[in-house]
Image (cartoon, rainbow, N blue to C red):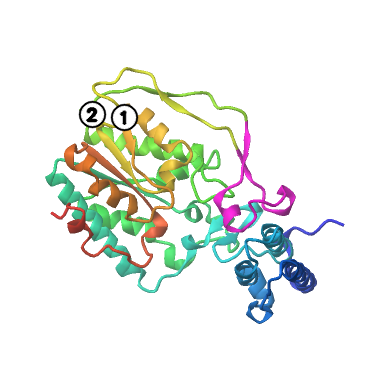
C-alpha cells in the first residue's frame, strides 16, 4: 500500500497519520533503546518529548539524536528513519525547513518574525552606507547585490500561498533606504522575476538560486559595475556547454535530516547539468589573485552556487576574486577580506557585497562599531 502525499493530509486522515506516527516513533525509540542496551549504554526516556507536534517539528528526533551515542552502529540510520517518518506521516520538516506546495521547500529563516526587525534592518543599512563612504575614501567603490528570498519569488509555492505581511515590503524598503543613503545597490528581484516567467530560478530543494537564476543575477550585477567602471581591464571568459543532468539534493533536504535516506522517502531532489566558466584571453597584467584583480566579491553561499562567480566574470568581462564564504552570515566574509593583508596592500577598484534578504531583519551580531573594526569608518 502506498502512502498518501504528505501535502494532502487533512482532517480525519491526519488523525490516522498521527496514530501511525506515534507507532512509528515507538518503534524507532525501541530500536534505539535496544541498540544502546546492547552497547551497554542507557537512554533516558523522560527527556524525549512524545507529542505529535514535537515529532513534526523535530524536537523528538533532536532529543533522540543527542542520546544515541555516535558509537552505535545504527545511530545515523535510526535518526534518518525517524526524520523520514516525520516527513511521510506528518508533513513535518523540522524547525529549519517549511514544506511548500508541489514539492517546494523553504528555509524557515526567510519567514521568521523578528520583534525589532525595522531597527535591525536600519542598522544594517547604516552599516552599508558607512562602509561605502569609507571604501570610497580608499578609492574602492562598493556595490551591494541584494539577493531576494526564494520565498519572495515563489510566494505562491508557500503552504499559505503568500508571504507573511511582516516581510511583504522588506525588499523594496531596503532598496529605497540604501539608495537614499547613496549606496550603489543592484535590484536583483526584477531580473530574477523576469527570468522566472520562463524557467525556475531557484532550486526547489535548496535555499539558493540555480544556474538560470545565477546567470540572471550575475548579468544585472555586471551591468551595474560596468556602468560605474567602464575602465576595468578586459579579460574574456566563456561558459562551456553543460554536462549531463545530475541529481542534486539541496541543503534543505539535508536540514530535514534526509540526506541519507532513499529518494522515495524524501522530497524530490533537483536535477541540474553542471556548468564551468573558464578564461579565454590572456591576462591584462599579472596573475590571478595579485594586485591586478580589479573586482572582489564578498558574501555568502549564494556567490558559490549556480556558477554565479563564473557568470559574473563572463558578463563583466573582467577578473573577479571570489572571497565569499559558505555558511557566512551578514558580516563574516567581508570582515575577513577587509582585515586581510591582501586588501590592505592592494585594494580593488570595486567591492561587490552580496547580501541575502533574510539577513536584514535578523538580530544584530557585531554591527556596532564594525566599520571602525575593519578600518573603513568614514
Query: 147 or 244: which is nearer to us?
Result: 244
Residue depicted at 58% across the width and 32% down the height: 273
Q: Which residues are magenta?
A: 245-271
Residue depicted at 46% across the width and 45% down the height: 193
What secondary structure is marked by label 1?
loop
- Residue highlighted by disc 2: 292
Residue 319 is tagged as: 1
Residue depicted at 31% across the width and 17% down the height: 282
Say which quarter of the image contains residue 45. bottom right
In the rendered image, the quadrant that contains the C terminus is bottom left
Q: Is residue 94 visible?
A: yes
Residue 2: give x, y in percent of width and height.
83, 56
Residue 363: give x, y in percent of width and height.
36, 68
Tell us which disc is closer to us: 1 or 2. 2
Residue 98: give x, y in percent of width and height.
58, 61
> Image check: 154 left or right of 257?
left
Q: Is residue 247 within the magenta segment? A: yes
What secondary structure is marked by label 2?
loop
Amino acid at each position: 500500500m502506498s502512502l498518501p502525499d504528505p501535502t494532502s493530509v487533512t482532517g480525519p486522515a491526519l488523525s490516522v497519520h498521527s496514530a501511525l506516527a506515534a507507532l512509528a516513533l515507538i518503534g524507532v525509540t525501541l530500536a534505539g533503546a535496544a541498540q544502546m542496551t546492547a552497547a551497554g549504554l542507557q537512554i533516558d526516556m523522560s527527556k524525549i518529548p512524545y507529542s505529535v507536534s514535537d515529532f513534526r517539528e523535530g524536537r523528538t528526533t533532536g532529543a533522540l539524536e543527542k542520546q544515541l551515542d555516535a558509537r552505535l552502529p545504527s545511530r545515523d540510520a535510526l535518526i534518518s528513519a525517524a526524520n523520514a517518518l516525520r516527513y511521510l506521516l506528518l508533513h513535518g520538516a523540522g524547525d529549519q525547513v517549511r514544506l511548500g506546495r508541489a514539492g517546494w521547500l523553504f528555509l524557515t529563516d526567510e519567514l521568521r518574525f523578528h520583534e525589532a526587525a525595522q531597527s535591525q534592518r536600519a542598522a544594517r543599512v547604516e552599516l552599508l552606507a558607512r562602509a561605502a563612504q569609507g571604501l570610497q575614501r580608499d578609492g574602492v567603490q562598493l556595490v551591494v547585490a541584494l539577493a531576494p528570498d526564494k520565498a519572495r519569488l515563489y510566494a505562491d509555492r508557500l503552504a499559505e500561498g503568500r508571504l507573511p505581511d511582516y516581510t511583504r515590503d522588506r525588499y523594496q524598503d531596503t532598496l529605497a533606504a540604501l539608495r537614499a543613503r547613496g549606496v550603489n545597490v543592484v535590484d536583483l528581484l526584477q531580473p530574477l522575476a523576469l527570468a522566472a516567467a520562463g524557467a525556475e530560478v531557484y532550486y526547489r530543494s535548496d535555499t539558493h538560486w540555480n544556474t538560470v537564476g545565477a546567470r540572471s543575477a550575475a548579468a544585472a550585477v555586471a551591468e551595474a559595475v560596468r556602468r560605474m567602471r567602464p575602465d576595468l581591464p578586459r579579460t574574456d571568459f566563456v561558459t562551456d556547454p553543460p554536462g549531463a543532468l545530475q541529481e542534486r539534493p539541496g541543503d534543505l533536504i539535508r536540514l530535514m535530516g534526509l540526506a541519507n535516506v532513499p529518494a522515495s522517502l524524501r522530497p524530490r531532489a533537483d536535477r541540474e547539468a553542471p556548468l564551468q566558466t573558464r578564461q579565454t584571453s590572456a591576462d591584462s597584467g599579472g596573475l590571478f589573485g595579485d594586485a591586478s584583480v580589479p573586482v572582489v566579491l564578498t558574501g555568502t553561499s549564494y556567490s558559490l552556487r549556480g556558477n554565479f562567480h563564473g557568470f559574473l566574470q563572463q558578463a563583466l568581462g573582467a577578473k573577479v576574486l571570489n572571497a565569499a564564504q559558505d555558511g557566512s552570515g551578514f558580516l563574516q566574509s567581508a570582515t575577513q577580506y577587509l582585515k586581510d593583508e591582501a586588501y590592505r596592500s592592494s585594494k580593488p577598484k570595486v567591492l561587490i557585497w552580496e547580501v541575502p534578504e533574510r539577513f536584514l531583519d535578523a538580530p544584530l551580531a557585531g554591527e556596532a562599531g564594525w566599520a571602525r573594526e575593519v578600518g573603513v569608518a568614514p
